[in-house]
Every structure is written in structure tokens, then in C-alpha cells.
Amino acid sequence: MRTRYRLPRPVLGSPFHLLVLLASFALCAYAGVRLLDGDWFLVALWFAGAAVVHDLVLLPLYAAADRALVRGAGRRGAWINHVRVPAALSGLLLLVWFPLITGRVSERYAGVAGQSADGYATRWLIVTAALFAGSAVVFAVRRRGRRSAADG
């Protein structure tokens, strides 16, 4: 008997899932049209440059940092994710707010936002410290819970 090969059917999900997916595509298309309405060449150049910088510079850097963290942890690597998560969140905040954190904003920012760009670096450092402190507290509570469960 010969078995017939069937192509896998795509998973479409529920009608609500499809509706949300189509709405997100429509929102992305609208944002793309609005974004490219001005100087489309510089926007496209910025996106291409960001992709190249990420893939050729940033990805090897944070992959090497993560590899060093894992090697340094050895067998007792229960704390690795308690460093990875706040570091990733802090890096994401730095990426999003980089011009304000470094102070590289034009005079138009204060006029448009109605706020000064001063103090972003300090606030980013405070948020980063709070993320790492919160992660350390979660790690300590989990560790204490494991010890008390092993003792009892």
C-alpha cells in the first residue's frame, strides 16, 4: 500500500485571531505610509542601517556577553535569568530612549514635547538599578523557598 503525502495545512486560528491579525497589518500599513510620507529615502536608509548595525555589531556583542555569563556561572547557573531579564529590559529602554539619554536631541524636542530632555540618563540608571534590585529580590525569595522546602 502506498501512503499519500499531504501538504500540511496552514494554521489559521479562530476568526477573532484572523481579525486581530488583519487589524495589526492594517495598522502597520497605516504607520508605514505615515512614516514614509516625509523623507522616505532617509527613513529607508535608517532602517537598513539599523538592521546592519544590529546584525553585524550588536548581536555578536550581546551573544558574547551571554556566552561569558553562562560560562562564568558553571553548574550553578540558577541566577543567569535573573541577570538576563533586567539586562535585556535595560538595554531595550536604552535603545528606545537613546537620543534622550545621551542628550542628542534638537531644540525642537522641548517645543514639541513641552518638556526638557534633561535627567533621562539619571532616570534610566535608576530604572536599571531598580530592575536589577527587583530581580535580586525575586532570586533571593526563590532561593529561600527552595531551601525551606528542602529542610522541611
Image (tube, helix red, strand yellow):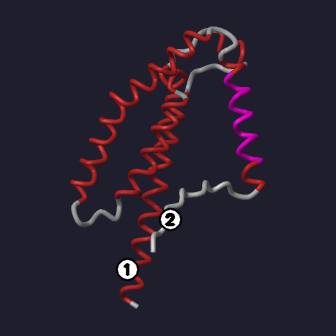
Q: Residues within 10 Å of mark 1 (few under 14, many from 20)?
A: few
The residue range painted magenta reads 19-32
Q: Which badge, 1 or 2, comes first in the chain's sequence?
A: 2
Left/right placement of residue 80 relative to residue 116 reads left
In the rendered image, which quarter contains the N terminus? Answer: bottom left
Image height check: is 29 above or below 83? above
Q: Is residue 23 above or below residue 136?
A: above
Image coordinates of residue 37 in percent, x first then y, are 70, 13
Crowding at dot 2, Cα within 10 Å, few <14 / some 14-19 / many 20+, comes out as: few
Question: With respect to residue 27, does 42 lie above or below?
Answer: above
Disc 1 residue type (three-letter):
Arg
Q: Which residue is mark 2?
A: 4
Q: Is residue 69 magenta?
A: no
Residue 36 % position (x, y): 65, 16
Residue position marked by numbered label 1 in the rendering: 147
How far across and how far down the image is residue 33, in percent? 70, 20
Residue at the (71%, 12%) spot, across then down: 111
Count of all numbered marks drawn on residues in the image: 2
